Amino acid sequence: MYTRVVLVEPEYEGNIGSIARLMKNFELNELWLVRPKAKLGEMARAYAMHAQEILASARIVDDLPQALKGVSYVVGTTAVSARRSSNLKRTSITPFEFANIMASTSRRVALLFGSESTGLSNKILESCDLTVTIPASSNYRTLNVANAAAVVFYELFKARGNAERTFIEEASKQDKYRITRVFKKLSEETRIPFYKQVLAEKALRNIIARTLISRREASLIIGILRKAADEIRRSRKASS
Amino acid sequence: MYTRVVLVEPEYEGNIGSIARLMKNFELNELWLVRPKAKLGEMARAYAMHAQEILASARIVDDLPQALKGVSYVVGTTAVSARRSSNLKRTSITPFEFANIMASTSRRVALLFGSESTGLSNKILESCDLTVTIPASSNYRTLNVANAAAVVFYELFKARGNAERTFIEEASKQDKYRITRVFKKLSEETRIPFYKQVLAEKALRNIIARTLISRREASLIIGILRKAADEIRRSRKASS
């Protein structure tokens, strides 16, 4: 798995340096900074210790889209695991679960960390394919960003070591999109209240985003759902 | 499990403060400092953030034996996992293994972290009941002490039962089974060749088995699939 570490508006040099060091500790090497509020000076270098090369090759960009070029899967980290129950999009998984899902894919992943004072914005979090939350005390959920990175990188490193190399020819983004689209068509045929259709569609999209699905599996399921929608339409026409 | 965190000759205020914060994040509260080389000043307090009480109640002692009074099990952390093969004592276990061993004991444990520049001495490590090493890159094994603490505290917190699925109220086995059953019924209505139905059903079962699905998501999807099957049946009856 290719993993790009993206820090969004980091505020402290020390944390940037710390994260560079952690990346070397856990064998990650591509660091991107979006609108950093700290410069990469002496302090960043001090904290980076023996990971100077990672710090020196960090890419600095003006906005998030630039930092996401060339990746196919965007993962946000947040201390706030889930909002209202209606908001299905924001159901986080743990670093352990995340690492185990990622270990067997060949996805190009961007792993986002927010600024020290505000974290990632809701807007960014909602645009992520997946969000990860570190289980922590309900009295104090927010970890320092470098410490949070330590935990997530550690789980990724562990999972890479332990993952069995079962090879799944993974469904493409398009295949996955086709599943949700054909499900949507089917749900329209059911005449279930519209808001429920929308929720169900979101639920399916979330599940699919966090799941490994093979091309073959995707095509089998698409086949059934599409045929079911056709059947409803045809029978209805015949009966009218 | 009672866990006392003992920092042996810590050198930087920032790390002491960071570790206090991490303790609160992961619900540990007893911090002891053996001959600290940094004072607990403004910087320590800044890094401790919302864990001021842990920092303020830290016990400062002159030697390790004083910091080990009242504990029955001493655990050292080290980046150097094993010395000579003859030295059996120094075979480290991972934080994950450590946490899982500890979760089921009522031992009073002291968890030792060494100084930033030298780590724990061999003498101290050899006197420990157990040593723990974080798996990391062979190119750069040494984590910053606060980041190492993050990983170990996180594993302890997870093992205490706090981690698994705290964020998603996961669908039960029955819920998952209901998805496949209702999908099966739907696929029967499609009149797709039987062998394909069986394959599709298997595919879905596999996907579900490897996926995290919440109760809510399961029930939304079941709702659509069931209604779709009903629709086909009803329209067909009406047309015949």
Image (tube, coloured by chain):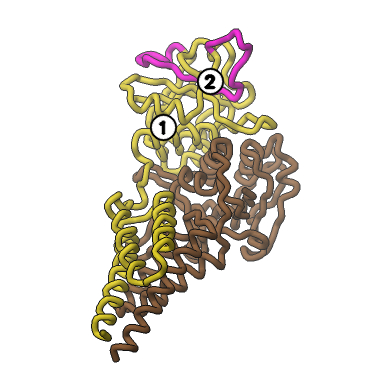
Chain colours: A brown, B yellow
Magenta residues, start to end: B65-89
Residue B178, placed above or below residue B68: below
* Closest to the observer, B205 or B13: B205
Let me know if marks 1 and 2 both belong to one chain. Answer: yes
| First of labels 1, 2 by sequence position | 2
Query: What amino acid type is highlighted by mark number 1?
Result: Leu
Residue A220 in the image: state x and y as whole percent: 47, 63
Q: Is residue A116 left or right of residue B216?
A: right
- Marks 1 and 2 in Cβ contact (< 8 Å): no
Q: In whole angstroms, how far apart are the C-alphas of marks 1 and 2?
A: 16 Å
| Residue drawn 51% across the image and 60% down it | A129
Q: Amino acid at mark 2?
A: Ser
Q: State which quadrant residue B217 falls in.
A: bottom left
What residue lies at 69% left-to-right and 52% top-to-bottom?
A: A39
Work out whether B29 lies above or below A102: above
In front: label 1 or label 2 = 2
In the image shown, does A109 or B220 lie closer to the viewer?
A: B220
Q: Which chain letter matches label 2?
A: B
* Mark carried by residue A13: none
- Density class for disc 2 (Cα within 10 Å; few <14, some 14-19, many ≥20) is many
Q: Secondary structure at mark 2?
A: loop
Q: Is B69 colored magenta in this rendering?
A: yes
- Counting from the top left corner in percent of width and height, residue B199 is at 43, 58
Q: Residue furthest bottom?
A: A240
The spot of residue A128 in percent (x, y) is: 52, 61
B39 lies left or right of A228 = right
Q: Is residue B116 magenta?
A: no
**Number of the label disc, if any, that sits on residue B92:** 2
**Which residue does the numbered mark 1 point to in the structure image?**
B156
The residue shown at (39%, 24%) is B101
User: Is A5 situated left or right of A207 in this image?
Assistant: right
* Chain that bears disc 1: B
